[in-house]
Amino acid sequence: MAGLIDRGDLSVTLHRLSRGPLAASGRPVCCDNKKQSRVERDEPRHRDLSGLSRPSALAPFRIRNYRFQWPSDLLTSAAFEMETIILGWYVLVQTGSVLLLTLFASLNYTGTLVAPLFGVLGDRIGHRDLLAVMRASYAMLAATLLTLALTGYLNATCVLVIAAFMGLVRPSDLGVRGALNADIMPQDQLISSIAVSRTTQDLARIAGALSGAGLFAGAGLGPSYVVIVSLYSIATVLMLCVRLPLRSRGGENAAVATPRHSPLHDLKEGVSHVWTSPGMQAGLWIAFLTNLTAYPFTNGLLPYIAREIYGGNQAVLGYLSAAFAVGSLTGSIILSLLASRGVGRLMLYTAAAWYLMLLIFSRMHSIPVAMGCLTLAGIVQSMSMIAIAVILMQTAGERFRGRVMGVRMLTIYGLPIGLMAAGSLIDAIGFSATVMLYVGVGLTMLTVIALHWRASRQRAQAPGVSQPDAV
């Protein structure tokens, strides 16, 4: 019986024992299973029974590593959101300039140009170790800003400098955590885990927006940054608790046996891998387009919208940001309960709906109605971004995941470009006209991407041509 348990799947073994005389003989099986259960602690325990029941949105939490990665990502994202809210408002109030506000927001994404190198580094040293180092650096930079605030030396220039250093590392966090997620999760739970991981950002944005605005308004910048430093520190410790999965160890051992190439060679190989798939190309182009023409109005310009358009304070800023995050969370939950069919069409349709909701939002003059528009925009935005992540992870080869997500993070560079252009355009033609221009460009280019992808898929499906896309 011990040989049977060691050789087969645990669920099949229990099924056989329940039918045969061994189950009725009363022989103890728990001792034989102890070693087996320890080995399989990080693996799904109901693979053979998965087809008999509806997949649960909480199924990823059965994986031990995910139970440490998820709260680490949650705390990190919450600290990100608190810093964005607090420092964005600080720069706007201290300088009164929308251009400097967009400059601050843009500096948070300077590292997108080196994000592919973070992907290469993650594939080499391990995504968990890279994330732990990155989050420790966030804690150090936040502690530096806290020290300046407590000693009275903080000013807008210091905030911009620290934001520039933070921006070198921070944009790669999302891609590296996505690659780690794909490492520790089985394929049949990938879409569910990505959707649940997306709720990490959404929950963090809700909590970070409300708590950050409240702390800053009630206690000041110094006490607020004590909380931020604590969040980063705890997130680093939780990430160190993630154990390297057995299959990742095997992959690393195999990599040691093969010749090492230069980082530039690995980067070129990753870009070439992306370029062979029309689905990955379409996803990356849409990611760049939305960062360029949609995200600026919900990421960097919200302090300006809250203060100049609605005449509000930090509380209004927190409400607007939280409304978008509530919608994003709702979209993540909805998608985590749905099947992964038609992911490509979902990506396109929800991106188009996102632009339409932003256009309606720009015409609203009531704060509650504007919050409703932002909530709807958050729903479709979340669905579109999850669809992109699923397409990339399902199509990318296992050893290319870090590099593919590094290229994905490179598309975020559209955001600082869009922010800086929006700052100048708002001064020149006004807020509503700027939104209308961005939405028009976004919808036009989205149509071009969709038509190009459709043509590429038709060519790939021609007789004698293999189809690389799995979506």
Image: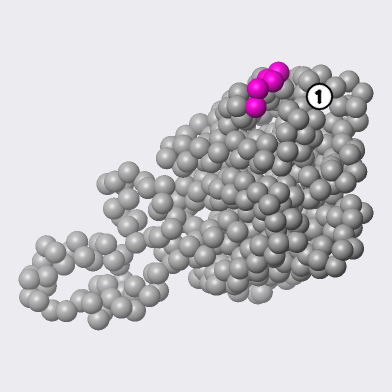
Q: What residue type is labelled 1?
A: Phe
Q: Residue, x 40% and y 53% (percent of image)? A: 59
- Along the line of sight, which residue is nearer the eye, 330 or 220? 220
Residue 281 belongs to magenta span: no
Q: Residue, x 25% and y 81% (percent of image)? A: 31
What secondary structure is the magenta-colored segment mainly?
loop
- Along the line of sight, which residue is nearer the eye, 308 or 58? 308
Q: Residue, x 74% and y 50% (percent of image)? A: 86
Colour scheme of the rendered structure: one colour
**Residue at the outermost front position:** 218
- Along the line of sight, which residue is nearer the eye, 219 or 376? 219
Whether residue 466 is situated above or below residue 190 in the rendered picture: above
State left or right for residue 268 relative to residue 357.
right
Quarter of the image where the N terminus is located: bottom left
Whether residue 164 is situated above or below residue 1 in the rendered picture: above
Whether residue 406 is situated above or below residue 9 in the rendered picture: above
Horizontal and vertical percent position of residue 365: 69, 20
The stretch of residues the image draws in magenta is: 363-367
Where is mark 1, residue-wise? 431
Q: Residue, x 47% and y 47% (percent of image)? A: 192
Residue 364 belongs to magenta span: yes
Residue 310 visible to the viewer? yes
